[in-house]
Image (cartoon, rainbow, N blue to C red):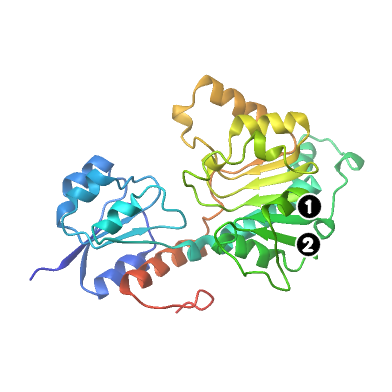
Amino acid sequence: MGLKKALIVDNFHQVLEDGLRDIGYSCTCRPGMSDAEIKAEIADYEVLIVRSKTVVDREMLDAAKKLKYIGRAGSGMENIDFDYASSLGVKCYNSPEGNCDAVGEQVVGFMLCLLNNIVKANSEMKSHSWVRKPNTGLELGDMTVGIYGFGNTGSAVAAKLSGFGCRINAYDKYRKGFGNQLVNEVSEEKIYSDSDIVTFHAPLTEETRGMVNSSMLSRFAKPIFLINASRGPVAVTSDLLLALKKGQIKGLALDVFENENFDSYTSDEWRQFDELAAHSSVIFTPHIAGWTTSSEYKIAYFLLLKIKGESFNVNKLS
């Protein structure tokens, strides 16, 4: 009987490859493989390790005659036909435990930047403009923060906010009973009525695609600071822009975008992007909230443990 085989088609921390080898896998590491190349070669592999750019669809799964495990780095499984894979007996794992702290820290950083005009003031100073009074800030401790989606990342955001003294409300359609001394478990309506800041941490599904739209934004009782570090297509870009113009959003921070391939942007997509970018109260980062040196290790490590079938404590790494 030959060695079991694992195909790793993106860059991962070495701990994943080393760990798979330790349990008897022969690893082929080919970052940058196209979906077509994977389909052509997947038949002999028991394990497939991917990130978000690889689409594991029915055609790929049908070609994967020996496949037992799919590992998806980080959170989200929208690029994998999970139901079909499960019907074939293929176990699918992601590792949201690996980057939730990284995202949580960046979300709090976004909040501090928005409330204290840090990015704007930095730009002004570098242009030799000393502006104080117009950059007067707001204190996070005076805010009510609404967390929409309370899984691994939403929970991490709440933990990072614990020392700021702000009121933390959280809503999750599919999770109940999580309220505690730190977090108030609230209804969706309470998110709309009370929030000064809203941060979204919902997975991308057919239900959540485009949910942050004009209809939702019109339900907030007051102008909000809005943060999206979940998935870009959760929010409709044109509706975010309109809400900014209407004053429904008074500050916006995006780490994710509806279209994250600049090379494919239409003229209208560039117009919307540039109009958003022109606002001094808008902050962009290129989908890096979950990317830290620590999360690179943890994402790979937790995937390895799940494939090995081992239990673990996310707060204690070996």
Location of mark 1 (residue): 194
Q: Are marks 2 and 1 in contact (CB under 8 Å)?
A: yes
Distance of label 2 from label 1 (alpha carbons) = 10 Å
Q: Which mark is residue 167?
A: 2
Judged by depth in the image, the label closer to the viewer, 2 or 1, is: 1
Q: Identify which residue is drawn at 84% across, 55% down.
A: 139
Q: Is residue 109 above or below residue 209?
A: below
**Horizontally, is 242 left or right of 310 in the view?**
right
Report whether 2 appears left or right of 116.
left
Return the residue nearer the eye: 271 or 15.
Answer: 271
Residue 65, image x and y in percent? Answer: 16, 55
Q: Does any portion of residue 8 appear in the rendered image?
A: no
Q: Is residue 54 visible?
A: yes
What residue appears at the point 49 percent right and 37 percent down from the top-left corner?
A: 260
- The image quadrant where one finds the C terminus is bottom left
| Residue 18 image position (x, y, % from top left) | 30, 70
